Amino acid sequence: MPLELGMYERRADYKSEKQCQRTSLAFYQAVRDLLPVWLLEDMRATEAFHWEDEGRACAFSPSEALLYALVHDHQQYARHLLQRFSVHALGAPSASFRCCAHSATPHVSVAVRYNRAGILKMMMDTLKDFADAAEKQTLLNHCGCAHAEGGKSALHLACDLARPECLLLLLGNGACPYVTDRAGDTPLDCLLQQISQRDLDVRAKRVCLGYLVLFMPALRFRMRAELRENPALWSRLIGEQALQWLSGQCPPSLFVQCMRKVTRSVPDAQLETLPDFLRPPDFRLHQF
């Protein structure tokens, strides 16, 4: 947290819990109503406080303000916070903003859950420019708490919720496609489970599957045995070609292998601007 916030914490000592509830709600509503950045920062710096469980009033940190900006898609405010406070805006919020210790850095997962691809891209740019490698990997691959996020990483959530744009941003910026959640499932396992259980968002799931295949040179995932044991079912769900690739019966097509080379050589910022013919292949997903 930036040092300048210390004086606001000291100034908050006289606030009561009821006063904090009012000012916290006012700040939340101001972000929700997309009020100008200068006004939001003036509120955060002078009059908006929240109450901590240990019995003290605290000013909103950039991290906590960014969570509000994510929830309400206030892109201008998110851009300001990331430009001014850099990776400090992606730090752990206070205990009252977290479910438990495992949800210490929830911003990337919140961006995926609310499908805030625009702000997620700003966050990825901030990590690329200002975070060291270890810090970046921690933020990208952290598995959240079992209560709010089911022990899943942001990649798992992108697959669970069929968010292809968020998935590409994460993969293109170095998120690990082999990370496992607390149940031992990879993002590909989660996506295949979604495909087998629901017939919604078929197009989005197809694109997500294409992205994962491109960023997984070695297809390591738990459901491979399931694909081999039920080929008729999975051929209907994802198509015969995708089934053969994922089950290990044949290598990916020459096109897919070439696309893997392209994704490794194209700068992260240009992945989203690839022409349609260089986009990942669409796997055939029939409705049930």
Image: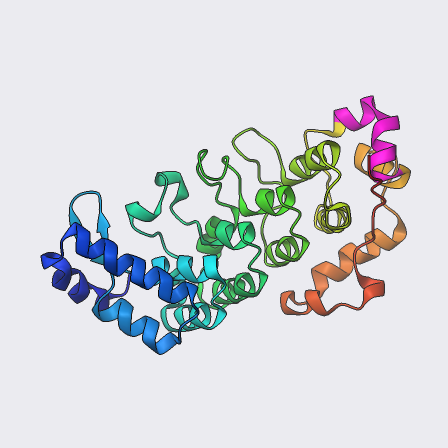
Which residue is located at x 70 percent, y 59 percent?
264
Q: Is residue 61 in view from this perspective?
A: no
Q: Is residue 236 magenta?
A: yes
Which residue is located at x 58 percent, y 55 percent?
115
Magenta region, residue range: 225-239
Residue 270 screen position, x and y as percent: 68, 69
Q: Is residue 190 above or below residue 261?
A: above
Residue nearest the observer in this picture, 246 or 266: 246
The outermost residue toward the top is: 229
Asked which quadrant contains residue 60, the reply is bottom left
Instruction: Pick the quarter of the image with the C terminus.
Output: top right
Q: Is residue 18 magenta?
A: no
Instruction: Pick the quarter of the image with the N terminus.
Output: bottom left
Residue 92 screen position, x and y as percent: 35, 52
Left or right, 281 with reference to 110:
right
Residue 266 screen position, x and y as percent: 71, 66
The colour style of the image is rainbow
Left or right, 141 with reference to 34:
right
